[in-house]
Amino acid sequence: MRKIGIITGLKSEADCLGPYLDPSKFEIQISGASSERAFTLCNAMARSGAELLISFGVAGALGADLNPGDLILPETIIAGPGTEFTVDAGIRNKLLSQIPKSLTAMKISSGSIYGSDALITSPEEKRALHSRFGSLGTDMESHKMALAAADNGLPFLVIRSVLDELEATLPKSVHGAIKPDGTPDYARIIANFCAHPSEIASLAGLALRSRKALSSLRGIAPLLEAL
């Protein structure tokens, strides 16, 4: 039995996995939306016996044709100019071959994910990254997981569900509002919202997009048992 380590940024992402995966086979860690913590946790999972690392969670869309809930199973991870990591093709293809007909209506893209240490919040930032690197999405964990995998000689896989489309702006009310355990810092959100009360509609839209993204993650989570 292969031992698998999974890194997520948010507890809500990890909660998509818990009901489906055997805890004796899978170790799930939450970075709390911290790239450096993701790297530390992935290294720790590798040292404790993980034979495969997986980055699992939501991503911001950099491609114009992606919508909330669309899946990205990238072939490569870009961590900056000249720094690129390649997903294990055999494991990725095995996952793709097991996707049931009930999920085939879901859009699944390949290409690359851009890893960022900082939150990418605006359409302008997203368009600039897509123009420079051609990546379809961005997150804050995959590049650090890929680096840890490379350092430890391990294969890796990335599974990301689109949270916000290219033209969506992440509300300022949620900036920096994730606790180390991956749960929302509601006190911070309320304080931020008081400074930006016009964001009520944006926050409602974010909640709706989040439900779509997490639904897709729950749909694909049971397939990880067969890896």
Image (spheres, helix red, strand yellow):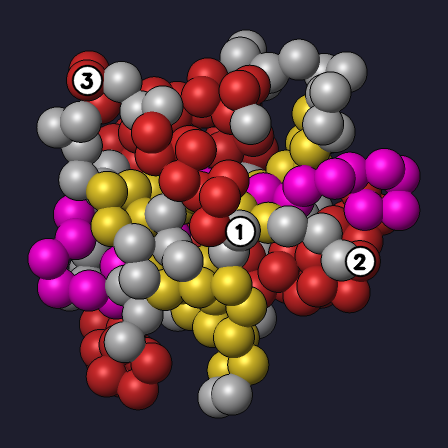
Q: Amino acid at mark 1?
A: Asp
Q: Position of residue 7 (x, y in %)?
A: 63, 43
Label 3 vs 2, first from the N-terminus: 3
Question: Which residue is identified by label 2?
Answer: 152
Q: CA distance from mark 3 to mark 1?
A: 24 Å
Q: CA distance from mark 3 to mark 2?
A: 36 Å
Q: Is residue 180 magenta?
A: no
Q: Position of residue 58 (x, y in %)?
A: 40, 45
Label 3 vs 1, first from the N-terminus: 1
The span picked out in magenta is 46-67
Which disc is residue 131 wearing? none
Local packing at callout 3 (Cα closer than 10 Å; few below 14, some 14-19, many 20+) is few
Question: Which residue is identified by label 3?
Answer: 101
Q: Residue at x 78, y 65 (%)?
A: 151
Corner quadrant of residue 122:
bottom left
Q: Position of residue 155 (x, y in %)?
A: 64, 50
Label 2 vs 1, first from the N-terminus: 1
Local packing at callout 1 (Cα closer than 10 Å; few below 14, some 14-19, many 20+) is some
Q: Quadrant of the C terminus?
A: top right
Choose between 98 and 216: the one closer to the eye: 98
Q: Residue at x 40, y 40 (%)?
A: 93
Q: Amino acid at mark 2?
A: Asn
Secondary element under disc 2, as helix, strand or loop, is: helix
Q: Amino acid at mark 3?
A: Lys
Choose between 193 and 81: the one closer to the eye: 81
Q: Is residue 165 visible?
A: yes
Question: Which residue is identified by label 1?
Answer: 88
